[in-house]
Amino acid sequence: MALIVQKFGGTSVGSIERIEQVADKVKKHREAGDDLVVVLSAMSGETNRLIDLAKQITDQPVPRELDVIVSTGEQVTIALLAMALVKRGVPAVSYTGNQVRILTDSSHNKARILQIDDQKIRADLKAGRVVVVAGFQGVDEHGNITTLGRGGSDTTGVALAAALKADECQIYTDVDGVYTTDPRVVPQARRLEKITFEEMLEMASLGSKVLQIRSVEFAGKYNVPLRVLHSFKEGPGTLITIDEEESMEQPIISGIAFNRDEAKLTIRGVPDTPGVAFKILGPISASNIEVDMIVQNVSHDNTTDFTFTVHRNEYEKAHSVLENTAREIGAREVSGDTKIAKVSIVGVGMRSHAGVASRMFEALAKESINIQMISTSEIKVSVVIEEKYLELAVRALHTAFELDAPARQGE
């Protein structure tokens, strides 16, 4: 008998019909002998609806009260699923984050889990019940309802699995696993049988939307095996694990991630003096703008050109801050570009293979795609290119690294 934590997202519980289907799936697992804890999101679109209601009252809702209202979405789905399970003869009980005592800090709308009291859940499991828990929410030490931020139900599932020392945390979603890249861009993309936490974390941070980053970090920290599965299609999904299998068949690259939401800013003719990077990026950071990639070039006239990327939504704000900085430090000009994209190759196999970056650059050169910026880490290489070449670049790299070749034995 295994202890499994299953998490179902908003599309999986988006209607009564779908909740009934989830109940059928849970019943099937329970009949196979597994102990089950089920974590649910609100119905798809419900959290946005609740936020819109709050914003009809005020443009800036009090964070504590916003948590009170948005946490009701999950309360509806957990009660409905518990009812559906009982109707099927499966003993079940639902709990909010407060009832389970998922203790968090007091950072409303983006709280972090501090501790979970698992006694109540263990008692119910021992009594033969399926325990249904509201995702996305907790309670602080003062008894205030808190929420974990967008995608927080994934984090709830992983945190419960860690606290209960579950055999596996299964994330049910609208895809049947993690793919080598987005199948909508590359139809030959393949589902991965297995991927490491490290690779998944890089892919999630680089634009892959399958899992929320915090949940992957949490799973890696506590070594909770994660499996991504389709809510309504049978299949093995993708297992995310700490295990790095060293073998001849280990692919160099596991996947290709991309992000269209990038914008680039350049400040030229900056006096090349110590501390210039801080003078440029300090005001950007003070404006709460996150910087991604950075390139600095020193010119022959003792000036430097400094280029960095930000999220496209932050471009206008960052441009304005940079214009002020340019005037203060005597820079020559500020320019920007919102029509760029970032493409990244990810794989733990890079550690043991030389020439991966040059192979990437060669594949892009063959398609006459110019590289504007480069960033590397131990298991990834990212490049910034013109947005119009994004899909061509992803397809070229997918082929160059043999990701769209027939699946190897065991994959």
Image (cartoon, helix red, strand yellow):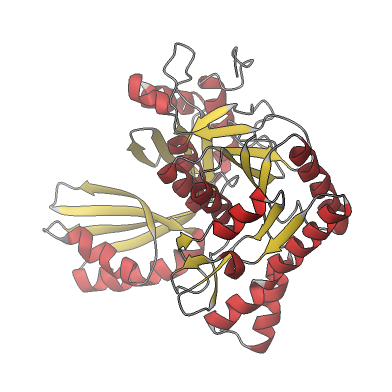
- Residue 339: in sight, yes or no? no
Q: Residue 382 location in percent, x, y?
A: 41, 38
Residue under the point 39% across and 61% down: 290
Residue 243 position by quadrant: top left
Q: Residue furthest bottom?
A: 57
Query: In this rendering, would 351 be left or right of 58?
Result: left
Q: Nearer the viewer, residue 240 or 367?
A: 240
Residue 355 position by quadrant: top left
Q: Residue 331 location in percent, x, y?
A: 23, 64
Q: Residue 301 location in percent, x, y?
A: 14, 51
Number of marks in picture? 0
Is residue 122 placed above or below 136 in the rendered structure?
Answer: above
**Quadrant, the N terminus:** top right
Residue 100 position by quadrant: bottom right
Residue under the point 25% across and 53% down: 305
Residue under the point 55% across and 58% down: 119
- Residue 349: in sight, yes or no? yes
Q: Residue 391 location in percent, x, y?
A: 60, 37
Query: In this rendering, would 112 be left or right of 60?
Result: left
Q: Nearer the viewer, residue 350 or 79?
A: 79
**Quadrant, the C terminus:** top right
